[in-house]
Image (spheres, rainbow, N blue to C red):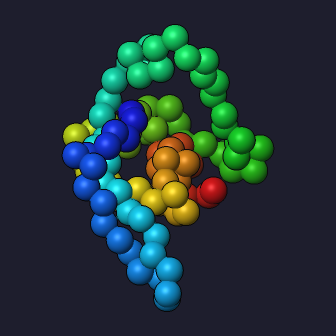
Amino acid sequence: ISSLPNTGKNLAQTLGLRSVPEYIRNVKKQLLKDMVGNDEWRVNNKYDQDQAPLPVREIIRRAEDYNGKKLAYRVFGSNCEDFVTLLRYGDQVS
């Protein structure tokens, strides 16, 4: 499951006097090899030492529930790390 740009639509979320860009991303199920091509990749389950992951079938079910949906994406909070930790642990722990 990955999040892909959605037609470049950019919204702005105002926080006090600063604006944090928010992007809408499409969630898409695809094979890892199709997503990364020849690039190197690794699994990083850095929170496993502090938090027990959900059963694999539950992680997959949760991920597939998001397939085809649109999600807000922000560099600071509600980002890809928050998304995968939500799927893996049931919480956004980053």
The residue drawn where x is 66% and y is 37% is 45
The residue drawn where x is 38% and y is 16% is 34
Total label count? 0
Q: Is residue 53 above or below residue 12?
A: above
Q: Is residue 94 visible?
A: yes
Q: Is residue 91 visible?
A: no
Q: Is residue 39 above or below residue 60?
A: above
Percent of width and height locating residue 35: 41, 22
Say which of 41 and 48 sits in front.
41
Q: Is residue 66 above or below residue 11?
A: above
Q: Residue furthest bottom?
A: 16
Q: Is residue 48 left or right of residue 15?
A: right
Percent of width and height locating residue 84: 50, 44
The residue drawn where x is 22% and y is 40% is 68
Q: Is residue 39 above or below residue 78?
A: above
Q: Quadrant of residue 11?
A: bottom left
Percent of width and height locating residue 42: 64, 24
Q: Quadrant of residue 22?
A: bottom left
Viewport quadrant of the N terminus = top left
Percent of width and height locating residue 17: 49, 87
Viewport quadrant of the C terminus = bottom right
Q: Residue furthest right?
A: 49
